[in-house]
Amino acid sequence: MAPNLVDSKILIGKSKAEVLDIIGKPKDSSNINFHYLIDFGYMAPYHLDVNFHENENKVIAVILID
């Protein structure tokens, strides 16, 4: 699921409320970032970062870090 969110760019341009509706509450957040921890239980977790434009509060980047 996480790679599809990055590759499809489906979150780009979405508001914070829309992101919360689509993928739920993040593990950590700030004014410009939602951070999700994706843990499969049998390997090192992935980190999904959703970055927002500072003034418009719309997604500008989605990054998957392994």
Image (cartoon, rainbow, N blue to C red):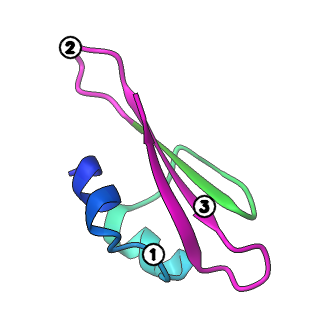
The tag earlier along the polypeptide, 2 or 3, is 2
Q: Position of residue 66 (x, y in %)?
A: 40, 27
Measured in 3D between alpha carbons, the distance from the residue under mark 2 to the one under mark 3, in whole angstroms, is 27 Å
Q: Which mark is residue 57?
A: none
Residue at horizontal 35 percent and vertical 62 percent from the top: 23
- Name which residue type carries label 1: Ile
Q: Which mark is residue 12?
A: 1
The tag earlier along the polypeptide, 1 or 2, is 1
Residue mark closest to the camera, 2 vs 3? 3
Q: Position of residue 12 (x, y in %)?
A: 45, 75
Q: Which mark is residue 51?
A: 3
- Name which residue type carries label 2: Tyr
Residue mark closest to the camera, 1 vs 2? 1
- Name which residue type carries label 3: Asn
The tag earlier along the polypeptide, 3 or 1, is 1
Q: Which mark is residue 42?
A: 2
